[in-house]
Image (tube, helix red, strand yellow):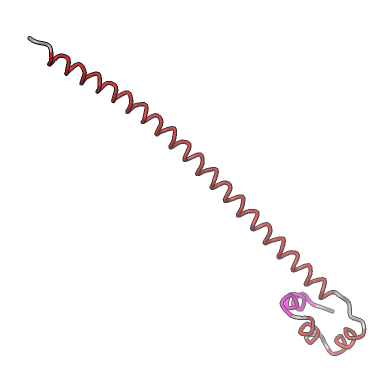
Amino acid sequence: MTTSSTSEASRSMTRSEWVSTLPPWRRLLATFNWRPVYDIEQETEQLRMRSLESEKRMLESERRDLDSERRTKQIEKEIEQLEIENKRLAALESRMDALLLNADSSSQTPP
């Protein structure tokens, strides 16, 4: 005789509050022959909530892992770019040194 609204309401109630919502004849039966339906519903709800929390933590962990991988790839690309720039700058510096040596040697030779 329990309706879905009663079972939904029972999720947030204690056992005594739930029993108080029953009709008097059902309350009497509940005192003589208590069936653990309410307790099972509560345990099921708690297990469901734990499962959802666990799934949420797992998804957060996966998201953090993906973010970490993305940042690592970005850093590796930046390192590669910096290495290319360093090589280019080293080549330019060696050309500049060669030009300065040529300029110095040409100014020191007598006319």
Q: Residue at x 32, y 28 (%)?
A: 89
The spot of residue 79 in percent (x, y) is: 44, 35
**View extreme (left): residue:** 111
Does the magenta portion include 7?
A: yes
8 left or right, relative to 103: right
Does the magenta portion include 103?
A: no
Q: Is residue 31 above or below residue 40?
A: below
Q: Is residue 84 above or below residue 38?
A: above
In the image shown, does 108 or 65 lie closer to the viewer? 108
Q: What span is colored magenta in the figure?
A: 3-13
Q: Residue at x 82, y 78 (%)?
A: 2
The spot of residue 22 in percent (x, y) is: 81, 85
- Image quarter of residue 54: bottom right
- Image quarter of residue 52: bottom right
**View extreme (bottom): residue:** 24
Quadrant of the frame with the N terminus: bottom right
The spot of residue 35 in percent (x, y) is: 89, 77
- Image quarter of residue 46: bottom right
Q: Residue at x 90, y 85 (%)?
A: 29
- Classified by dominant secondary structure, the portion drawn in magenta counts as helix
Number of on-image labels: 0
In the image shown, does 30 or 107 lie closer to the viewer? 107
Q: Residue at x 60, y 55 (%)?
A: 60
Quadrant of the frame with the C terminus: top left
53 left or right, relative to 20: left
35 left or right, relative to 86: right
**View extreme (top): residue:** 111
The spot of residue 109 in percent (x, y) is: 12, 11
Q: Is residue 31 above or below residue 5?
A: below
